[in-house]
Image: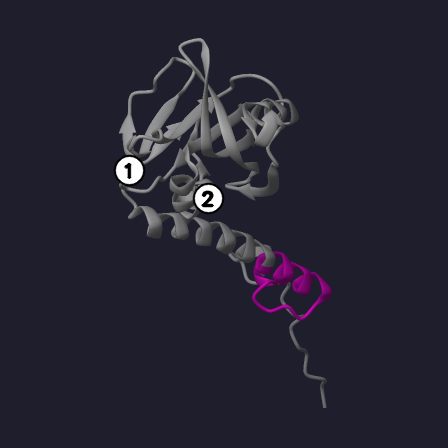
Amino acid sequence: MGCEQKAPPSAGQPGKPLGGLSESPQSILGKSAKMGKDVGKQIQGSQDQAVNMANEITGGEGTVVVSGVKFAPLKTWASVQPPNRVQTAALRVAPDEGQGETAVAFFANVGGDVASNINRWKSQVTGEGGSPADAKISESTAGGMKLTIVSMEGTYNAMTMGATKAMPGFGFRGAIFETPGGNIFVRLTGPSAKVREADEAFKAMLVGATRE
């Protein structure tokens, strides 16, 4: 006639996150733990997808590291000696076929905030009559860093050996990564047709960037 005694429910299994609550979400705490776990998986999945996209386009060969940030460029883009000391790294996308070379340039900590650098870029690309070219600006994140991309078409007024050289019919893509160690800049320039051909691979390289 004695009452059978039952052991109190376990708060969780030792050795598992939150005592196993996320595995058996029967309580409010358990459901919250599972929700947090699911969100974490989604964030990691998004980053993995971006990296995989870049690897598919680049073939996973060759990387460029700038101030602790790793980029995977298209495998056919040749690494070349930067033309000046300001550039950290440089890639040749397409050779000069009479209209100008298509190239990617990397810069680290060259000064100025995001807004001032965007304004500087706008002054370098002009439309008809010398008016500033229309700039398309997008913001996102990549590798946990804020990423701003500026796209323009027009006459690119490039600085060459201390002088300005006007290059009509050019495309300009500028990217700014905001990192704890300072801003990193990536620039794609070249004849408009060549830049448009490189757009997908360039953006894949940007969104696939990771911090070491």
Seen at 28% across and 29% down, the residue is: 79
Q: Quadrant of residue 34?
A: bottom right
At label 2, the amino acid type is Lys
Q: Residue 1: within the magenta?
A: no
Residue at the location (54% across, 36% down)?
152
Q: Which quadrant does the N terminus fall into?
A: bottom right
* Residue at image mark 2: 203
Foreground residue, 74 or 198? 198
| Rendered location of residue 157, percent (x, y) | 49, 22
Kindly identify which numbered label has been placed on residue 95: none
Residue 77 horizontal side relative to residue 185, left or right: left
Amino acid at pointer 1: Gly
Counting from the top left corner in percent of width and height, residue 101 is at 34, 29
Q: Callout 2 environment at 10 Å: few (<14), some (14 to 19), or many (20+)?
A: some
Q: Residue at x 55, y 62 (%)?
A: 13
Q: Is residue 118 left or right of residue 175?
A: right
Judge whether 139 appears above or below 91 on screen. below
Q: Which residues are magenta?
A: 20-38
The secondary structure that dominates the magenta segment is helix
What separation in Å lies between label 1 and label 2 (alpha carbons)? 17 Å
Q: Position of residue 181 (x, y in %)?
A: 53, 23
The residue that mark 1 highlights is: 62
* SS type, badge 1: loop
Number of dots carrying numbers: 2
Residue that lies at the very extreme toward the bottom in this rendered image: 1
Residue at x-position 54% and y-position 23%: 124
